Amino acid sequence: MKIDEVFNGIVLDHIKAGNSMKIYKYLDLDRLECAVAIIRNVKSTKMGKKDIIKIDAPIELNLDVLGYIDSGITVNIIKNGVLSQKFKLALPEELINVLHCKNPRCITTVENQLDSVFKLSDRESSVYRCVYCDTENS
Amino acid sequence: MRHLIEITDLTVEEINRLITLAENIITNGRRFSEVCKGKKIATLFFEPSTRTRLSFEAAMIELGGYVIGFSSSDCSSAAKGEMVTDTVRTVGCYADIIAMRHPKEGAPLAASKYSPVPIINAGDGGHNHPTQTLADLLTIYREKSRLDSFTIGFCGDLMFGRTVHSLINALSRYENINFIFISPEELKIPAYIKDDTLKKRGLGFKEVERLEDVLPDLDVLYMTRVQRERFFNEADYIRLKDSYILEPSKLYRAKKDLCIMHPLPRVNEISHSVDNDPRACYFKQVQNGKYIRMALIMKLLELEA
């Protein structure tokens, strides 16, 4: 499949094989009316195997969530059948309401009005910590 | 507006200035007796405390200010299920500054996002206790005349000991501190303190189980209580509570100028017979705590003598 098959939309490339369904779930892609293609286990010279997601509409993506799930993804934005923007993702510095603290002593477990905020504590090992109690996401 | 939620909210220079101010207060107390005239501190203690709450209250009174607050969540609208963020928004209408202790970790940080007045974290669960750290730093400084180049041993509950976590964080920013952690396996220092605070800054540390093995090397010994309230399982508490008991017989191999510290309250981890040893500094910590809190209140309210 070629990316120009999407006319106005997004192609998420270089998804680590097996991560596409997770992304589908986290980004709520099942709620979209437009065509969404999930292509799994595509042969890749760099990665061996990879997944690709094609979304046939110019939706707004939560890049923080995407970067957290798989920081190796390449995002391709297609406008009028032409690749208009292409960029790599990175682990976001902060995640808001993506992760939830599992520490029963944390204030976020009892006060639901608080945003759940995690900060990147170690980029190398992708460790995030709750800003309220410093508990590591696991 | 500044809050004090964790010790790293203050730079090393700010901490040093607070220590200088506290020493000035100790020497010239009268000059500061009206600095907070007309100001009120609210002490919101959702968890029991003797020293910290009374220390804040005494500090404000000695600065000429007033005190309002509560000393148990049963005496506040928390008992009706009020959220801590609503409580501080309300109290912020009455007081100029709030000192808060809460059993939930991160409660003071959450409060600071909504409060119209400065929040001081007076202890949040097993997490942080920055004003105890300031009291500890002032004590070490007054005993050693420096905050660098010494060996400190932390002994006891290093997992849930919030005073330990805050003090390590603070001292890791000073030069040439040698850290030794003495605890049973189950109460070892959390990985995030080792990884984020010490290893990231390239600081070395040692972990041991026996106090006797390292006592002669120490310039400062920081004892802690195994805290019943941090355990979900009573059996674990009973098994670990008497892991370390400091007695005069153990101290004969320690340095003559060792500084023995404890954030108090103690249960039986330091024998009362150690109290008369000139190396016992834990009641000096209590005294210093009031002075450093006076300095902190002045700083956060942006007041000068």
Image: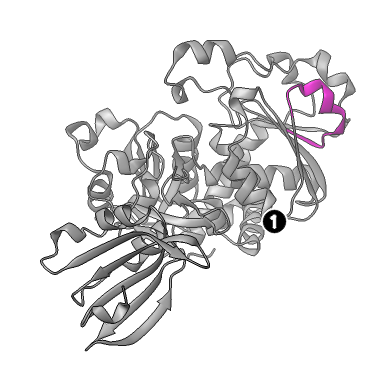
Relative to residue B194, is residue A24 depicted above or below? below
Magenta extent:
B208-221
Residue carrying label 1: B201
Question: Residue at (34%, 61%) from the top-left corner?
Answer: A65
Q: Is residue A92 visible?
A: no
Q: Position of residue A107 (x, y in %)?
A: 34, 42
Q: As rendered, which of B43 and A114 lies closer to the eye?
A: A114
Q: Position of residue B151 (x, y in %)?
A: 80, 41
Please tell me in which quadrant of the rendered image residue B125 appears.
top left
Q: As rendered, which of A109 and B175 lies closer to the eye?
A: A109
Question: Residue at (82%, 37%) from the top-left corner?
Answer: B219
Question: Residue at (52%, 42%) from the top-left corner?
Answer: B129
Amino acid type at mark 1: Arg
**Residue A119 on the magenta span:** no
Q: Position of residue B287 (x, y in %)?
A: 61, 38
Please tell me in which quadrant of the rendered image residue B139 appears.
top right
